[in-house]
Image (cartoon, helix red, strand yellow):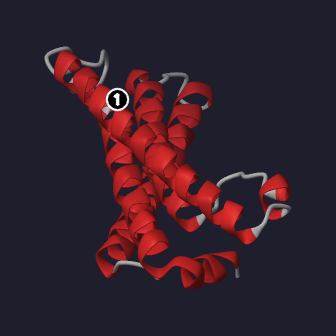
Amino acid sequence: MRFRILDHLARIMALIGGLALVGLVAITGWQVWGRYVLNDTPTWAERLSLLLILVVALPLAAVGLRENFHLGISFFVEALPKGAQRAIAVFNTVTLGLFGLAMATYSWTLVAGTWNRDIPLLGVPQAFQYIPLVICGVLIVLFMGERLWFQLRHGERFFDEERD
């Protein structure tokens, strides 16, 4: 049970993350080629690689939460009765949603505070380092809101499908 628009959003984030990963590999390859073959290291490559790592990791982490690809230890929860399992799942969803909200809110403060400072060697605002944090936080809020909606609306049927 999913909202289609969030399915599309998750796919778009996966596509952007994949393209950023390809760019990261290409830039790192160019950096190695420049350093060891041309004996002239491109100074911007390392800084851009660090920026692309954020673009790859953070939005895809939110997608991973939605798809339950994240690392989790469910041994103790599975030993509990179904009612307690459902309560813990709802609590977990709300907690993750609040974490995403805090992440988006406080990282937006970082974006606003660093917009007028440039990243050395790249010439783009330093805020670009924090924009993936905002995106990740917003995505977590959206995805956990979706999960909570289905947990509360469809109850037992949702939990049975999620377990499969």
Between 103 and 51, the one nearer to me in the picture: 103
Toward which corner of the image does residue 157 lie, by quadrant?
A: bottom right
Q: Amino acid at mark 1?
A: Gln
Residue under label 1, please give it: 129
- Residue at left offset 44%, top offset 56%: 17
**Residue 70: percent from left, percent from top:** 65, 54
Give the left or right position of residue 48, taking residue 30 as reference. Answer: left
**Residue 29: percent from left, percent from top:** 56, 42
- Residue at left offset 73%, top offset 52%: 72
- Residue at left offset 41%, top offset 61%: 143
Give the left or right position of residue 119, taking residue 75 as reference. Answer: left
Query: Is residue 56 something one can see in this rendering?
Result: no
Looking at the rendered structure, the secondary structure element under dot 1 is helix
**Residue 83: percent from left, percent from top:** 67, 67
**Position of 137 relative to 10 (above/below):** above
Q: Quadrant of the C terminus?
A: bottom right
**Residue 133: percent from left, percent from top:** 37, 37
Between 100 and 159, the one nearer to me in the picture: 159
**Position of 154 relative to 119 (above/below):** below
Give the left or right position of residue 66, taking residue 114 as reference. Answer: right
Query: Is residue 48 something one can see in this rendering?
Result: yes
Between 108 and 119, the one nearer to me in the picture: 108
Toward which corner of the image does residue 130 lie, by quadrant?
A: top left
